[in-house]
Amino acid sequence: MKQSYDAIIIGTGQAGPPLAGRLAGAAMKVAIIERKLFGGTCVNTGCIPTKTMVASAYAARMARRAAEYGVNMGPVTVDMKRVKARKDEISGWSRSGVEKWLKGMQNCTVYEGQARFESAHEVRVGQDVLSADRVFINVGGRAIVPGMPGLDQVNFLTNSSMMAVDFLPRHLVIVGGSYIGLEFGQMFRRFGSEVTIVEMAPRLIHREDEDVSAAIHDILEAEGIRLRLNAKCIHVAKRDDSVVVGVDCTSGDPEISGSHLLLAAGRRPNTDDLGLEKAGVIQDKRGYILVDDELRTNVPGIWALGDCNGRGGFTHTSYNDFEIAAANLLDNDTRRVSDRITAYALYIDPPLGRAGMTEAEVRNSGRRVLIGTRPMTRVGRAVEKGETQGFMKILVDADSKHILGASILGTSGDEAIHTILDVMYARAPYTVMQRAVHIHPTVSELLPTVLGELKPLASQEGAVGT
Ligand SMILES: Cc1cc2nc3c(=O)[nH]c(=O)nc-3n(C[C@H](O)[C@H](O)[C@H](O)COP(=O)(O)OP(=O)(O)OC[C@H]3O[C@@H](n4cnc5c(N)ncnc54)[C@H](O)[C@@H]3O)c2cc1C
């Protein structure tokens, strides 16, 4: 059947549904297409379920530490079926919320099935061919399955299949020491599994500064997680009931024998089965759709939002893509991707909150830079909570006084970072924050103190005259 619309949206991730709401609200006739689970990655296999499980793991950890706080408890056990049921319930609320909202939306028709372009402005879903002048691609991404020798011989898990795990793996071996691998690793260690994380790079989350990587390394190792860095030539094999991961590391055993293998080696966009070639939409060599600053592809009338455009990789960046597209189309408000400041969190415990540039990036930028740091052992709230791991670091442009970036690794670091982020968005000098009265006792109350103790970056002492 042929149907014509004002707008077609492919995918119900973080950008598609709110965009459907705005376009339908502006009296456009909208079609939205979903091939699997409403709400996409964040709701079903990403942020929401993992952070729900991180909360269970935190409860297990605090129960084991209860005596330190004067609370007596018996032996702590984790019921993985209950952990999964709680996760399923919370994730399920979100999924059904998105589905009901879209299906009840006026001017919006929901199609369930695989969408493929037939031409620049025609999209097929099963027997239906939909056409529209405007097409928005919000197809997200999925786990990369790396071409490791032996992978076809063993069972492995990804962030998606991990969602079905309702038992305690005896020994979880994780390939990938970045954000997803670390979150799952600490979580399952706290549930009671043995955990080994195998990483090819010389350090964990190597996009972060070395001091941040090193502090996270110590936090995870202190919980009994084994870390195998510099792992080259990773290969896998099945041996009896175990999966054996062979690595060529500079130190340590050449083999790790685990009960389960989780692949957390990155993500790839869902653009390989979309018929993009029929629409003439250009991708880069990794499959990300190329977009301009307002998220338009090379084909007039086609936009790409969220993870599939390679410009963000987070729920908040995908949602911001919706805001940018809607503002430009409907509000005569020129919003751009380049106005966005890098911001994200790593949800190990304690979490890492990040804003703006890393120290390595500011060093390479050639600016004169000031730095302020403080260990969490000198943050009253952290001491009171008995959670003193980590540190905070703020980088400031010595000339403009603008904050360039910050890392807060520590209790509430994912929240406190927003104080920094908002000053950066305001394009205000850091001195503004020193006049603000922050609440005691919080982690954020120490940010003005850190800013009061700025020093020139180590190799720039002579250059920054303060
Ligand atoms: C384990 C994990 C933890 C994460 N934790 C966080 C976090 O804490 N914070 C954070 O900000 N981000 C996190 N992320 C990233 C976040 O989940 C994604 O950035 C976000 O979901 C991207 O949303 P999206 O809108 O691009 O697309 P997605 O949410 O991926 O949705 C795309 C949708 O399109 C559908 N689709 C794909 N192709 C087609 C097609 N051809 N036809 C029809 N439908 C199609 C898919 O089924 C899917 O429902 C995490 C990711 C993972 C994997």
Image (cartoon, rainbow, N blue to C red):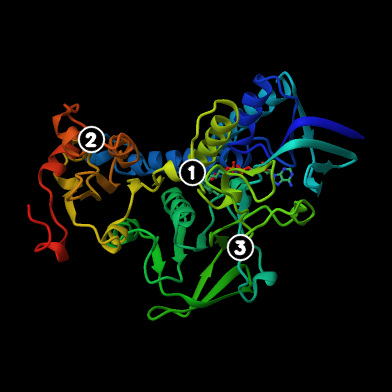
Q: State the image coordinates of residue 108 (x, y, percent, origin top left).
A: 74, 25
Q: State the image coordinates of residue 133 (x, y, percent, origin top left).
A: 75, 36
* Type of the residue with mark 3: Arg
Q: Is residue 102 above or below residue 313?
A: above
The residue that appears at 53% across and 36% down in the rendered structure is: 324
* Type of the residue with mark 1: Val
In 3D space, how far apart are the residues under numbered discs 1 and 2 (Cα atoms)? 28 Å
Q: Picture quarter containing residue 427?
A: top left
In 3D space, how far apart are the residues under numbered discs 1 and 3 (Cα atoms)? 20 Å
Kindly report which numbered mark, 3 or 2, lies closer to the viewer in this rendering.
3
Q: Which mark is residue 315?
A: none
Residue in front for this viewpoint, 455 or 72 = 455
Provide the residue designation for mark 3.
286
* Type of the residue with mark 2: Ser
User: Tag 2 or tag 3, which sits nearer the N-term?
Assistant: 3
The residue that appears at 29% across and 43% down in the rendered structure is: 65
User: Tag 3 or tag 1, which sits nearer the N-term?
Assistant: 3
Q: Secondary structure at mark 2?
A: helix
Q: Secondary structure at mark 3?
A: loop
Q: State the image coordinates of residue 394 (x, y, percent, origin top left).
A: 23, 48
- Crowd rating for badge 1 (residues with CA inside 10 Å; few <14, some 14–19, many 20+): some
Residue in front for this viewpoint, 132 or 232 = 132
Position of the N terminus, as image quadrant, is: top right
The residue that appears at 40% across and 47% down in the rendered structure is: 342
Provide the residue designation for mark 2.
444
